Amino acid sequence: KLETPLEYLPFLPELAGRPGVDVVLGKGSGKANVAEQLERRGLNWTDADVDRLATRVREVATRERRLLTASDFDVLIDEIQT
C-alpha cells in the first residue's frame, strides 16, 4: 500500500528529488492494485468482484498494450457493477 512505501522501497524517492510512488493499472496488476484504486474512490467491493475487475484490467491493458487511465478504469467499474 502507498501508506507504507518503506516496506518495499529502500528509501523515499522524494529524498532523492524524485516523484513519489503511484499505483498504476496494467497487464501485471493484481487484486491489491485494483483494491487500492477502488479504495481511493471510496468503493468497497467483495473479493469476488475485485477479482473480476482485476481480470478485466489485465485483459484490456494487454489488448491495448498500455497502462489504463483513470477514465478507462471508471468504464470497467461501471461494466462490472451492472
Image: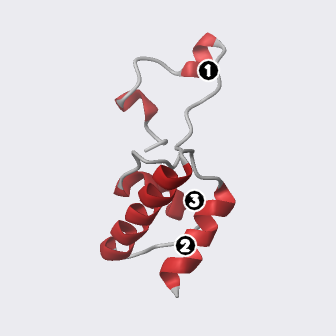
> Which tag, 1 or 3, sits closer to the chain's start?
1
Q: Where is residue 60 in the image (x, y as percent from the top left)?
A: 50, 59
The correct choice, above or below, for 82 with respect to 18 in the image is: below
Task: Bin the neighbour count of mark 1 within 10 Å (Cα to Cα): few under 14, some 14-19, many 20 and up.
Answer: few
Q: What residue type is labelled 3?
A: Arg
Q: Name the residue under label 1.
A: 14
Mark 2 or 1, which is nearer the eye? 2
Q: What residue type is labelled 1?
A: Glu
Q: Where is residue 55 in the image (x, y as percent from the top left)?
A: 38, 63
Examine the image and state in which quarter residue 10 appears: top left
Q: Name the residue under label 3.
A: 40
Name the residue at the front extreme: 63
Quarter the N terminus occupies: top left
Mark 2 or 3, which is nearer the eye? 2
Gap between marks 1 and 3 measured at Cα = 22 Å
Residue at x 65% of width, y 53% of height: 69
Label 3 secondary element: helix
Task: Bin the neighbour count of mark 3 within 10 Å (Cα to Cα): few under 14, some 14-19, many 20 and up.
Answer: few
Residue 55, numbered label: none
Residue at x 43% of width, y 48% of height: 27
Q: Position of residue 15 (x, y in %)?
A: 59, 15
Gap between marks 2 and 3 measured at Cα = 13 Å
Q: Mark 2 points at which residue?
A: 77
Given contact means CB atoms under 8 Å apart, are the residues at marks 1 and 3 in contact?
no
Q: Which amino acid does label 2 sit on?
A: Ile
Given contact means CB atoms under 8 Å apart, are the residues at marks 2 and 3 in contact?
no
Gap between marks 2 and 1 measured at Cα = 32 Å
Q: Which one is in front, 62 or 68? A: 62
